[in-house]
Image (spheres, rainbow, N blue to C red):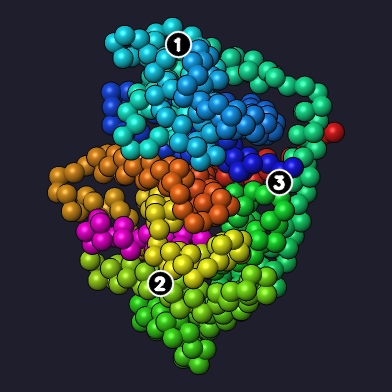
Amino acid sequence: MGFSRAFYACSIPPVEMEHCPDHTLAYKPLRKNNHQSQHLSFTVKMNFTSSMHKDWMKLETYSVQLERIRWKRQYMKAGTHGESIQDLYEVALRFRLLRQEGYHVPADVFNNFKNKEGKFKQNLSKDIKGLLGLYAASQLSIEGEDILEEARDSAAHSLTQGWNILITTKLQLSGIHWSIPIIRACQADFNMVQSIHQQELLQISKWWQDLGLAEELKFARDQPLKWHMWPMAVLPDPSLSEQRVELTKPISMIYIIDDIFDVHGTLDELTLFTEAVNRWDIAAFETLPNYMKICFKTLDESQMNQHKVYKEHGWDPVDSLRRRYWMGLCNAFLVEAKWFASGHVPKAHEYLKNGVISSGVHVVLVHLFFLLGHGITRGNVDLVDDFPSTISSTAAILRLWDDLGSAKDENQDGHDGSYIGCYIKEHQGSSMENARQNVTYMISDLWKRLNKECLSQHPFSTSFTEGSLNIARMVPLMYSYDDNQSLPHLEEHMKSLLFEAFPL
């Protein structure tokens, strides 16, 4: 038995991952309301407790898995809506776990906790455990569920007011419902999964070293460990080790090509590079600088490895990956390069439309689709090609979150613009604060769209849908730079997952 998808996101800074590590959301910005400052304060305060609860969060996932199975069985037998349960934590936990399993549990199950005026009852402010559960459940809202918006506001407000007892309560909660056999089993399970990931890192390190790109392209990022964190989050199933290793390779190439366009290549070189990719003609690269030849050769060889998909699943994705996705990515990069070179500032919607493609999310998820090999049919391949909401919303979240950051990637002084800059240029008189606030609202709406997608029928496998969600969950961790242009939360996350085993 392996850890659930949430295990890999449990150290993500935003509050919802702190108090309950099996959320569908790793981050969901706030809709405009009177309690916004309290939400932000609450989020910051909760970050302080992450290191104290690191071991507890690793262990709690095992218990949450058992709870999910239990509530799923009960829901199948009797349903949830018809029962009147007065324990807020239990109702919130049922709601959250069942929605994560794709059951459209009605949000009005929380009406029992409102008073005659339609407000959440005042005495709930003393139920810290229940409020934590309510806040977590509120993150799985879809459009039109005002009660969940109210639940989030009420829970955050009460938890902020009760901050003095919050840490103590959380520590008290960490020991409930645990038995020694369960703890030991969970510890052993964690250590086993950690060992698998360590073996993957050895494979990735050897692959990266053998490529020699770090020596040949000294201007580009050299971060294979960081890049492998994406597949670790996207594919948490321990049995998918080979897929994680293979997925790291196209992700690495996205970063390298991004650096070629963003920090090194001239516009003329980038134009020729893109034209050669569009033709996928090795001969065309002979006229390009050596660093571009090396990059394209590596990319071409990595795509040739995709032929194994045909052997395993009977579908050869190479031509599709080359001519649609890598071409699309490079063309989107070139559009941004031309904007910068000409000094043109596009409309915000125009920038985002291109930025969704230049995020690289589509490339990653299409590789994931073929690596998983679930439901590969002409119809499903065409659906993936059409950029469904599962992919486009995730890509937009990544692009917008990246643009919210105040710092670029480590030592990267790039020229790819930002949505916020475009928005301020388009909306004369708008402040930076207003622009950033608008972006947070957009991300919130995109999360609701993703939540709705999970609750709707679609032809994609659960692994693929969860993989798309996991990318969105991982985004805050990968782009939360501090003033020193570093990623302390990510560093702590990697240390916890890969290098700190439980003593048995």
Tags 3 and 2 in contact by the CB under 8 Å rule?
no
Residue at the far front: name it.
77
| Upstream in sequence: badge 3 or badge 2 | 2
Of the pair 437 and 73, the residue shown nearer to us: 73
Amino acid type indicated by mark 2: Gly
Residue occupying image coordinates x 52% and y 89%: 282
- 202 in relation to 257, above or below: above
Residue beneath disc 1: 124
Residue occupying image coordinates x 57% and y 44%: 490
Near mark 1 (Cα within 10 A), the count class, few <14, some 14-19 or many ≥20, is some
Residue at the far left: name it.
428
Residue beneath disc 3: 498
Q: Quadrant of residue 358?
A: bottom left
Q: Is residue 71 visible?
A: no
- 188 in relation to 231, above or below: above
Residue 269 placed where, x, y %? 40, 81
Callout 3: helix, strand or loop? Answer: helix
Query: Looking at the image, how many numbered discs can be counted on the residues?
Result: 3
Callout 1: helix, strand or loop? Answer: helix
- 211 in relation to 358, above or below: below
Residue beneath disc 2: 328
Tags 2 and 1 in contact by the CB under 8 Å rule?
no
Amino acid type indicated by mark 1: Leu
Near mark 2 (Cα within 10 A), the count class, few <14, some 14-19 or many ≥20, is many
Q: Is residue 188 magenta?
A: no
Is label 1 or label 3 in front?
A: 1
Range of magenta residues: 345-365
Amino acid type indicated by mark 3: Leu
Residue 44 placed where, x, y %? 46, 29
